[in-house]
């Protein structure tokens, strides 16, 4: 199984989530490429695509949104998983509700969308970003749950591997979503 993990990250912490996710998937037997959305010309070589983005002011970064628009038809032909990453407020709840991800998930018929808490380091933020952080009350720190990220990667590989086994004669489920249509 070949997987593309493509992630839009402004300050690097969402890219670190993508790296951890890819490592988990590789550990469970997948071949994984990790590329920024703007560096992906086509997705035809992949069985599964994971698209992620940092969330700022309830929006995905432009490169992730443009990736989903550019490859929408091809993405509907395979399993696609989405994830968002952003700051958290007190009690661990997400500061942002990412409406972009909901629209993307619907348009490309994504299998699942996950939101992972992110990392907030005020030292790397611009003036406007620091102002927004103060307004929403997001605390500084690293809130990423590496175990949850790794478990999700294992789940994606397990789900796809089971479907491929079914295709090889045990059952009748297709390896790619497009074959279901």
Image: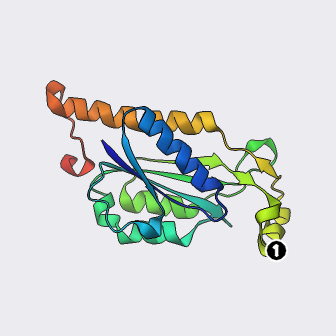
Q: Nearer the viewer, residue 104 or 128?
A: 128
Residue at 44% across / 57% down in the picture?
A: 105
Is disc 1 placed on a helix, strand or loop? helix
- Most extreme residue toward the left, as rendered? 169
Out of 78 and 142, give the one closest to the viewer: 142
Provide residue 90's location: percent of width, then percent of height.
82, 46
Q: Classify residue 162 as left or right of residue 111.
A: left
> Quick check: 34 left or right of 137?
left
Residue that appears at 29% across and 62% down:
74
Above or below, 53 relative to 1: below
Asked whether the viewer can see residue 114, the reply is: no
**What residue do we see at 60% from left, 50% from top?**
16
The answer to whether residue 23 shows anywhere in this view is yes
Residue 25: quarter of image? top left
Picture coordinates of residue 23, whole percent (x, y): 49, 40
Q: Is residue 51 shown left or right of residue 12?
A: left
How many residues crowd mark 1 within 10 Å: few (<14), some (14–19), many (20+)?
A: few
Q: Residue pushed farthest top?
A: 170
Q: Is residue 15 above or below residue 32?
A: below
Q: Residue 140 in the image: x percent, y percent?
A: 82, 52
* Residue at x 65% of width, y 39% of height: 145
Place residue 127 in its image quadrant.
bottom right
Q: Residue furthest bottom?
A: 128
Looking at the image, which is closer to me, 160 or 25?
A: 25
Q: Work out which quarter of the rendered image holds the N terminus and state it.
A: top left
User: How many numbered marks does the figure carry?
Assistant: 1
Point out residue 177 in the picture as x, y percentages from the top left corner. 26, 48
Q: Which residue is mark 1?
A: 127
Colouring used for the render: rainbow
């Amino acid at each position: 199984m070949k997987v593309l993990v493509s992630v839009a990250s402004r300050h690097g912490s969402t890219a670190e989530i993508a790296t951890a996710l890819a490592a988990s998937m590789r550990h469970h037997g997948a071949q994984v490429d990790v590329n920024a959305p703007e560096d992906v010309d086509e997705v035809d070589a992949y069985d599964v695509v994971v698209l992620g983005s940092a969330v700022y002011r309830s929006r995905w970064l432009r490169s992730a949104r443009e990736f989903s628009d550019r490859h929408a038809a091809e993405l509907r032909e395979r399993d696609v998983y989405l994830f968002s990453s952003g700051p958290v407020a007190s009690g661990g709840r997400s500061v942002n509700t990412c409406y972009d991800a909901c629209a993307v998930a619907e348009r490309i018929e994504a299998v699942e969308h996950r939101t992972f808490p992110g990392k907030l380091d005020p030292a790397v933020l611009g003036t406007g970003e620091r102002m927004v952080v103060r307004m929403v009350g997001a605390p500084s720190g690293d809130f990423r749950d590496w175990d949850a990220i790794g478990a999700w990667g294992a789940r994606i590989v397990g789900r796809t591997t089971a479907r491929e086994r079914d295709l090889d004669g045990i059952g009748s489920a297709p390896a790619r979503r497009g074959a279901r249509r």
